[in-house]
């Protein structure tokens, strides 16, 4: 009896992991799934006539959720049935952070609420940071003595903050040390 030999492996016979690029479709909206790693394999396509094959894609984080979010003794069929219509949420919000403790399977509606709330929180944090940076920049451009805006400020011993050039002249006349 002879052994069955599959033959040499080619790029079409081995699964591979790639990243789906983020694209803008013809309607101007972002293509779903952009930026997520996915596993790609070349398999028999039952929807096509004959022995046709086509590329099949599965999101990497969804495959990992099968292992990370369900008990080992649960049959794969039940897991896939439970995952149907559900999303896999990245707790950290980073779409490539596929650590098992970072993945949770959640209902689509609640996942949308979570992600929208996170996006609003991140936007609010970003807005607060921009405002804080502006306050710092504005404080650096204002004279600590006369509170006027100035392009050039000097540090003066005995004063909190920096003073403008005209105030620094007045301070120098009083005998204090000025640091440019």
Image (cartoon, rainbow, N blue to C red):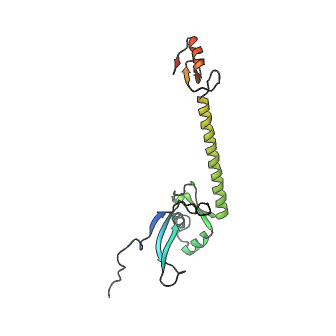
**Residue 122 location, x and y as percent?**
62, 49
Depth order, front residue of 11/60: 11
Task: Give the tally of numbered discs.
Answer: 0
Looking at the image, is 108 positioned above or below residue 147?
Answer: below
Does residue 149 appear anywhere in the picture?
A: yes
Instruction: Decide: is 39 above or below 98.
Output: below
Does 163 sit above or below residue 72?
above
Q: Position of residue 166 (x, y in %)?
A: 59, 18
Q: Residue at x 61, y 30 (%)?
A: 139
**65 or 148, nearer to the observer:** 148
As drawn, the residue found furthest toward the left would be 2
Do we see residue 75 in this rendering? no
- In the rendered view, does 143 fall on the left or right side of 10? right
Image coordinates of residue 41 in percent, x first then y, are: 46, 72
Direction front: furthest residue: 26
Quarter that holds the N terminus: bottom left
User: Which corner quadrant of the image does residue 164 belong to?
Assistant: top right
Q: Residue at x 65, y 51 (%)?
A: 120
* Residue located at (65% from left, 60% from top): 112
Q: Position of residue 64 (x, y in %)?
A: 51, 64
Where on the picture, by quarter, is residue 152? top right
Nearer to me, 154 or 132:
154
In the displayed structure, would residue 38 be above or below residue 43? above
């Amino acid at each position: 009896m002879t052994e069955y030999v599959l033959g040499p492996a080619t790029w079409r016979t081995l699964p591979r992991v790639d990243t789906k690029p983020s694209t803008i479709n013809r309607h101007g909206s972002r293509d779903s799934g952009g930026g997520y790693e996915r596993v790609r394999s070349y398999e028999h396509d039952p929807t096509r006539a004959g022995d046709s094959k086509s590329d099949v894609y599965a999101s990497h984080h969804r495959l990992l959720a099968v292992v990370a979010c369900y008990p080992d003794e649960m049959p794969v069929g039940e897991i896939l049935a439970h995952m149907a219509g559900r999303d896999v949420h990245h707790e950290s919000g980073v779409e490539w952070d596929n650590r098992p403790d970072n993945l949770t399977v959640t209902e689509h509606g609640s996942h949308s609420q979570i992600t929208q709330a996170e996006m609003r929180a991140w936007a609010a944090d970003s807005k607060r940071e921009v405002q804080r940076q502006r306050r710092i920049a504005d404080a650096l451009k204002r004279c600590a003595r006369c509170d006027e805006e100035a392009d050039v400020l000097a540090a003066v011993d005995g004063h909190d903050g920096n003073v403008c050039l005209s105030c620094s002249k007045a301070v120098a006349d009083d005998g204090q040390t000025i640091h440019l």
